[in-house]
Amino acid sequence: MKLLELYILRRVGQMFLTALLPVLAIIWTTQVLARINLVTDSGQSVGSFMKLATLILPTIIPAVLPFALVIGITQALTAMNNDSELAVIDAAGAPRRTIRSPGRFCCLPRPSASFPSSWPISSSRSFGSARAR
């Protein structure tokens, strides 16, 4: 990657993380509060509630990643446009690919990162019994 592409990629990455954490916190809080009746009705302890809350995270992250990525790319390019950095890059004669490729680079690992996390996790006992049939 060229120096300009690395600069844009760094800005997109910073904005992605800046958007991911609050969006993830909001969605996680709403999901946990929706399940608080499950814990309080059965008389469970605070420890079991926290365990339930942390077990919800792997199901939420794949749903939040694309939104945070779109927000990150949009915010980074908008900030660069407001600071006239995109005009300077265009005036320097850089091709449009220089601006597009960091966004594409960020989008490529996203499906491969969220797909394995959505696989059902089966216990070794059920896996062994399925193999024995």
Image (tube, helix red, strand yellow):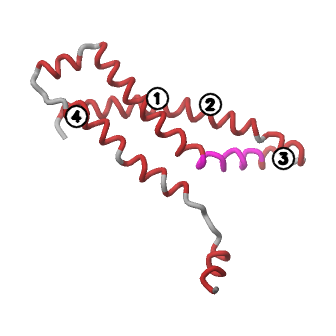
Q: Decide which of tag 3 and tag 4 comes sooner along the chain.
A: 4
Q: Counting other residues with Cα less than 10 Å from the Cα at mark 2, is it few (<14), some (14-19), or many (20 or more)?
A: few
For the record, the magenta segment spans: 49-59
Q: Nearer the viewer, mark 3 or mark 1?
A: 1
Q: Nearer the viewer, mark 3 or mark 4?
A: 4
Q: Quick check: is 128 in the magenta stretch? A: no
Q: Counting other residues with Cα less than 10 Å from the Cα at mark 3, is it few (<14), some (14-19), or many (20 or more)?
A: few
**At numbered mark 1, what does the secondary structure look like: helix, strand or loop?**
helix
Picture residue at 64% right of the left edge, 37% below the top: 28
**At numbered mark 2, what does the secondary structure look like: helix, strand or loop?**
helix
User: Label 3, label 4: how many angstroms apart (C-alpha)?
Assistant: 50 Å
**Tally of numbered discs:** 4
In the rendered image, which residue does mark 2 sit on? 26
- Going by the numbered disc 1, the residue's amino acid type is Thr
In the rendered image, which residue does mark 4 sit on? 5
Q: Determine the main secondary structure of the stretch shown in magenta.
A: helix
Q: Decide which of tag 3 and tag 2 comes sooner along the chain.
A: 2
- Going by the numbered disc 2, the residue's amino acid type is Ile
Q: Residue furthest left?
A: 93
User: Label 3, label 1: how many angstroms apart (C-alpha)?
Assistant: 33 Å
- Give the position of the C terminus as an image quadrant: bottom right
In the rendered image, which residue does mark 3 sit on? 45
In the rendered image, which residue does mark 1 sit on? 18
